[in-house]
Image: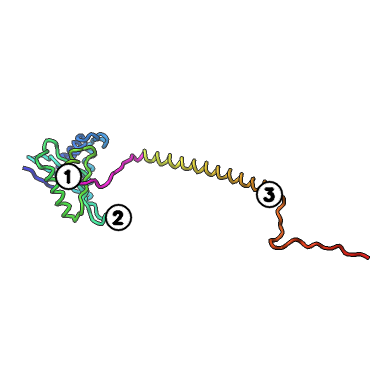
Amino acid sequence: MLEIRPAREDDLPAVAALAVEARDDSPTGAQLGAQETGRLLEHLSVLLAAGGHVLVAEQNGQVVGVVLGRVVDAYLFAYRASLYLDMLFVAPRARRHGVGHALLRAATDLAAEHACADIYSAPVPGNRGVQRFLARLGFAPAAGHRVAPVAALQRRLAADVAARDAHAGRRGARIGLEDLIARRRRARSVLESGPIDLRPVGGGAPSRRHPAKTG
């Protein structure tokens, strides 16, 4: 018999084990970090304490599937709440028996309960089985996420700043040299053209004085 229900505290070790299994089930699982059960249990406890939702599928007394979800309230780019599924996974031994559908129905009921407009799912990267399952049920691509390690990003940003500063320094030196050349050209032009006429414009030529007559 299959039962979908909220996880209890004593279910968390089984949920953590499924999370490790989900990583192993993906070709890119090794890129997702160390498979430390203790750390996963800590994350699950934090998720529950922060109002997250953990639904498990229990079959014959064993937890064989899980949904990890959190309600994201309306924010700057969304005027209605959404349910975000961080994980949807069914153990390989329990697949093709409707467990995934049952978990997703429970997630849909949870979304309706919280007046969510949409359900977003973030399956483990590379898990084509989950991707196909979601696509058959009408899930469509919503956005492309990009990820960068913090340390690598800090190094790249520092390198970009240094390169920009060096470019600005070269540009400033070039502008200074061009300005010096322009001023020298102006000075040379003045020397070659003779003294500047300082008479007021429209003042006309200075009048000549006739020498005084004697005698």
Residue for badge 2: 76
Q: How far separated are the C-alphas under marks 2 and 3?
A: 63 Å
Residue for badge 1: 67
Q: How is the image coloured?
A: rainbow
Q: Residues within 10 Å of mark 3 (few under 14, many from 20)?
A: few
Q: Secondary structure at mark 3?
A: helix
Q: Is residue 126 visible?
A: yes
Residue type, mark 1 in image: Val
Say if mark 3 contacts mark 1, CB within 8 Å: no
Q: Which residue is pictured at 55% across the width and 45% down the height? A: 175
Q: Earlier in the sequence, mark 1 or mark 2?
A: 1
What label sits on residue 190 in the rendered view? 3
Residue type, mark 3 in image: Val
Q: Which residue is pictured at 54% across the width and 44% down the height? A: 172
Image depth: mark 3 or mark 1 in front = 3
Coordinates of residue 74 in the picture (x, y in percent): 25, 55
What are the residue bounds of the magenta stretch? 135-151
Q: How far separated are the C-alphas under marks 3 and 1?
A: 84 Å
